[in-house]
Each structure stands twice: as C-alpha cells, then as structure tokens.
Amino acid sequence: MKILKGTEDLGSVVADIVEHTLTLPQPKLILPTGSTSLSLYKELVNRELDWSTTTTFNLDEYVINPNHPQSYNSFMKKHLFDRVNIYPDNCHFPFRPTEAFEAKVTESLIIDLCILGIGSNGHIAFNEPGSSFKSRTRVVNLSEQTIQDNSRFFDSVDDVPKQAITMGLGTIMESKKIVLMVNGEHKKDILDIAMNGEVTEDVPASILQNHDNVEVLYCE
Ligand code: GLP
C-alpha cells in the first residue's frame, strides 16, 4: 500500500496510471464515483489527454432518473465526460436488463484498468457486505449504512435511492489491473480489515487480496 500526502497527490498518482492506460490501443476502463475520485477527475481534465479511442464502464448507478443531479451519470458528465474528448456513446453505465450490460463489459473486451473506492462498510461499487464473490451485474438493495453515508449528497436521507445497479465482484476481478483509492482516516480501519484480515464475503473489498495486480493508494 502506498501512503500519499493528500488528495492532490492521490489524484495525481492515479492520473499517471490512467494516462499510461490511455496510450494502449482501444483502452477499456472501469470508473468509480464518490468524493474520493474527484481529485483524480480534476487532474485528468487538467492534463488534456486524448480520450477519443477510450471506452468506459461505470461501476454502479442508483435506481434513479439518469438526469437527476445526484445520479452517477450526472456526476461523471460534470466531472469528466463533458470536459474531455471522449465519445458519449463509449461511456456506459449499468442498465437493465443487467445481463445485457454484463455482456457489454465482458464480450471480447478485457478491462485494462479498474479504479475503485471503498465504502465505510467495506463495499466496492455497490457490492454490500454478504455479496457473493462470484456476483455479476445486478440490482441490489443498499444497506442502511450506505444510505446514511450517501445522504450527505441529498436533501434528506429519505431522498437517497434504496436500490442501485452494480457491477459484480466477479466482473470487477476480471480486470487486468485494479487501483483502490482510499481517502480519510475514517476509512483506515475498514481498509486494514479488507487488506490484512480474512478474505470473506462479509467484507467485499477483501476479495482484492485474491487479485495479483492491485495497487492500494491511501491518504488521510
Ligand atoms: C459510493 C460508491 C462507491 C464508492 C463509495 C465511496 O457508495 N458506490 O463506488 O467507492 O461511495 O465514496 P466516497 O469516496 O464518497 O467516500
């Protein structure tokens, strides 16, 4: 695990990895949302990279109108997609039927790089504790903890969607390389449990111990 000085450094180190990935032919990326990813997207926009051959898949999306200001679709447009030369048709968000999205991610495409954050309960994407390590893209019920954590982005806790569509842990693990971005002291304990504790479906991020190309980057 690399410990970085602050969010700017965190964004810049992950942006270096993305920049390298964008030099590959027809790069395929899995992208996260959430406050931790903001420093990354800011840095990527500043670098004015060529995104014209890149295809992206977002990890998850609420069951919500995609035009809602708090949808992950809106988040990605605001912080990245509307600010770089990526083709909107190449930017994919989980949709129903989930099997069709899953096929899009996996058919003939090997994901070059998957960037993840971690939830305070150890979730990755919206794979909540108890998710099967073999899971694929599906509709999930959000845990009470996640609804509370994400209520800061909504007017009230009652406005937080109760369901989401998420890529599965099995899908994520097929990526060639995975980067886990973690920001904040409040995530220190769950990160330690996920990286050094038992590999168990009770702590979804612990599955990353089974991947042979994972970088974990942390800043307080
Ligand atoms: C959400 C997303 C996760 C993300 C997590 C952490 O729940 N579904 O993919 O990793 O938030 O977000 P933050 O960086 O805001 O703490």
Image (spheres, grey):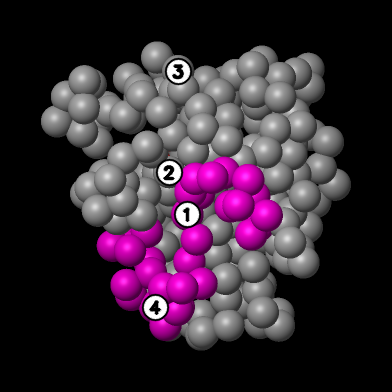
Return the residue at label 4.
84
Q: Nearer the viewer, residue 16 or 131?
A: 131
Which mark is first along the chain, 3 or 2?
2
- Asked whether the beta carbons under mark 3 and mark 4 sit within 8 Å of each other, the answer is no
Residues at marks 2 and 3, CA–CA distance in whole angstroms: 15 Å
| Dot 4 beta carbon under 8 Å from ligand 1 | no
- Closer to viewer: mark 2 or mark 4: 2
Return the residue at label 1.
93
Q: Amino acid at mark 2?
A: Glu
Q: Residues within 10 Å of mark 1 (few under 14, many from 20)?
A: many
Q: Write down the region rendered in magenta.
A: 76-105
Q: Is residue 129 magenta?
A: no
Which mark is first along the chain, 1 or 2?
2
Residue 124 appears in the picture as rendered? yes
Q: Amino acid at mark 4?
A: Val
Question: Mark 2: which secondary structure?
Answer: strand
Return the residue at label 3.
143
Return the residue at label 2.
61
